[in-house]
Amino acid sequence: MATARNLPSYTDGYWWSGDGLRLHYRDYPGRSDPPPLICIPGLTRNARDYEKLAERLAGEWRVIAVELRGRGESAYAKDPMTYVPLTYLQDLEALVAALKLDRFVAVGTSLGGILTMLMASTHPERIAGAVLNDVGPEIDPAGLGRIRGYVGKSTWHPTWMHAARAVAEANAHVYPNWGITEWLDMAKRTHRLTSAGRIVLDYDMKIAEPFRVPGNEAGPDMWRAFEGLKDKPLLIVRGGTSDILPAAVADRMHAQVAGSELLTIADTGHTPTLTEPEAEAAIDRLLERVT
């Protein structure tokens, strides 16, 4: 692994979707014997969300941080109605095939956790372990409504400090103890600088279009999909004030998978960053079980 400060700790990788999109992932190197981690971000997020987790584990564990279509360096879809979980699942299956991965640990935040459950339901034998970050088979309607209220709304900022302040205003209820340093870090994870000098959100605004189709909330039975994780090393992380993963749903998930661990991050909403000390320790315990 590169150690010089001016060299990245990862390489950029690319794969192709079934409908011809060039998709991107960051590949952090690790030992060849343990299964790699595939880290799948949330709805509006990208591979940078997993930067600190990957850098902490890299060297021992190979970490593949993916960017779903329409996010980060992955191509934007020509048809916005492909911004749905079943298409994302097909894209991830193409990645697994391209990298010839027999087994892996899936780490999924929010939408990434839904995709983790879907991957487990189709090929449970490939899942060596899983982390579900603030998501489950049932989603609180209040949180879903909040997401619908902001996703796909285009904004721009003249400076990173302006972006950080906007991120802080929108997420103060999620991370009430954060300061300007954390907000600036989050702004740089979620935004990009355009050639025109504007700082904008780093995703295709059209990912919101499937939300606007009446009845499009209906999807696969996620409790049945969740059954694919039974008997697997499983860590369920929940924000203590989450409006996406109700405590009762998290408790039911924990009860259904013997040996699973349920970790609640206090004073945190949707979603924990997985860089909290207690989350890092829990991930390490999960990986010990995997090996």
Image (spheres, rainbow, N blue to C red):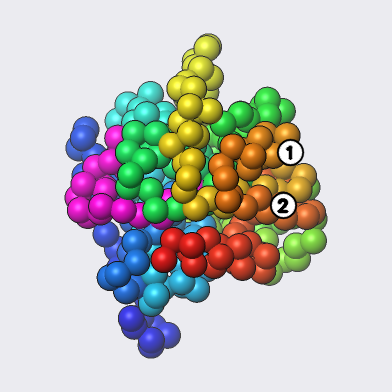
The residue labelled by disc 2 is 264
Extent of the magenta region: 90-109
Instruction: Characterize the local packing of mark 2: few (<14), some (14-19) or many (20 or more) Cα atoms within 10 angstroms.
Output: many
Residue 31 shows in the view: yes
Can you tell which quarter of the image residue 6 is in?
bottom left
Q: What residue is at 68 percent from the left and 29 percent from the top?
A: 140
Instruction: Characterize the local packing of mark 1: few (<14), some (14-19) or many (20 or more) Cα atoms within 10 angstroms.
Output: some
* Residue 148 image position (x, y, % from top left): 61, 29
* Residue 143 image position (x, y, % from top left): 68, 32
Q: Are marks 2 and 1 in contact (CB under 8 Å)?
A: yes
* Residue 94 sits inside the magenta stretch: yes
| Number of marks in picture | 2
| Residue type, mark 1 in image | Ala
Residue 60 has which mark? none
Q: What residue is at 63 percent from the left and 42 percent from the top?
A: 254
The residue labelled by disc 1 is 247
